[in-house]
Image: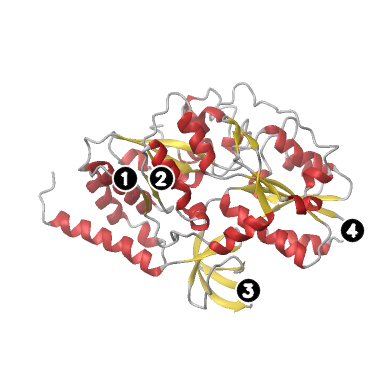
Amino acid sequence: MDYISEFRDSAAIKLLVREIGKYSDIPLKVMEICGGHTHTIMKYGINQILPPNIEFIHGPGCPVCIMPKERIDHAIVLARQKDVILATLGDMMRVPGSESSLIKERADGIDVRPLYSPNDVLNIARDNPDKKVVYFAIGFETTTSMTAFLIDAAVKQGLKNILFHINHVIVPPPIEAIMDSANVRIKSFIGPGHVSAITGIGIYKPIVEKYKTPVVICGFEPVDILQGILMLMRQFNEGRREVEVQYRRAVRPEGNPKAISLIEKYMDIRDSFRWRGLGDIPKSGLKLRDEFKHLDAEEVYRDVLPDKPIDDHKVCRCGDILKGIARPYDCRVFGGYCTPETPIGACMVSSEGACHAYYKYRRDDG
Amino acid sequence: MCLAIPSRIISKNNLLATVDVYGAKREINLMLLPEDAEIGDYVLVHVGFAIQKVDKQGAEEALVLLREIAEAGEGQDSS
């Protein structure tokens, strides 16, 4: 077993589609929270091979997509500071800020390093003792654990030239914000597989209790998503409302306690964080704990960092798409002015964005 | 960025490891793993870190479910 091909097997896919078809009288409006799931769905045409009683609503699980312009501008301002090397994960490079992007800055000679792995931050810091390496940290709980590891390593190894700009967010609050807003049609969730590998499944129980929406945590192969849909159908058919794990090869109920305690050691929950499209959501973002304020780029560079909220371009519908009330093709500029090479909004830039997925995998029938 | 790939450990050096993923070799960090992983184990790798060991029994369970569906289907008329 390589744990991948078994879950892409076309016979298994056909089998699951047939089995799901037996529940054609149950309407299923399901939000897949994670952008990675949106990509699998679009790549394998899962929304097209399933019967019409099943409707996918794309969720806000794209940490680059949800970051408002003013935070992108922070990255640019920090990169431009004297003796700063700005390091961040590759997806951030092309996201448009209000006037520029990190890739444009790099083209202009500013020292911006796109990383494959947060591990590289430590090497950059050691190789450049006269510079300040600012790690612009993005991501949900999965990547948050890596930032916590980096902070731990920097502290233990006495690396004095690393600062952190924390933009980490957590899954449950935006889901509650979406479910609490008007016109919500979501009845169930496909839960994020790798976030859950870190957090465990307890974080979804309040959502199930409050909104009576089953949650099935799925892997990222087509068989995983289809199996998850089948599990949701069976819950509705049997009158159950539970958190279940389809992705048993990766998700344990308790998650990864080592990663969780490392996160809790260094980070705390912010009172509020502004999300593109969803606005200010209380207790949805993380920050460094007070005793680590000296490592916090937002503190150290407080005087130069802008703080006015900046709205998106008027034509950009990324906010509505993240709320699940519009699809990429509802946007006037989708595929025309807005493409991955010339993005207007973050949903098109990020490899997890819904617009990017639709653009990449669209077929002639739309 | 959500994605994590099951990768087989082919060598270990303390808390770093080399893994094989689709024939490509990558060096990864094992320090976030909640339990030990040995050569030959599969781990889920996300941006250079192993976040969990692949639970072989969990993988088997999913495949058993598929087999059950297939067998149940063979006993029924398809509509």
Q: Mark 2 lies on which chain?
A: A
Toward which corner of the image does residue A211 lie, by quadrant?
top left
Q: Mark 2 points at which residue?
A: A190
Q: Mark 1 points at which residue?
A: A232
Q: Name the residue under label 3.
A: B15
- Distance from Cα at disc 2 to Cα at disc 4: 46 Å
Quick check: can you spot residue A272?
yes
Q: Do labels 2 and 4 share a chain?
A: yes
Q: What element carries label 2?
A: strand
The earlier-in-sequence mark between 2 and 1 is: 2
Please state which of residues A36 and A323 is positioned toward the viewer in this rendering. A323
Q: What element carries label 1?
A: helix
The earlier-in-sequence mark between 2 and 4 is: 4
Q: Are marks 2 and 1 on the same chain?
A: yes
Q: Which amino acid does label 3 sit on?
A: Leu
Residue drawn 37% across the image and 64% down it:
B59
- Distance from Cα at disc 4 to Cα at disc 3: 28 Å
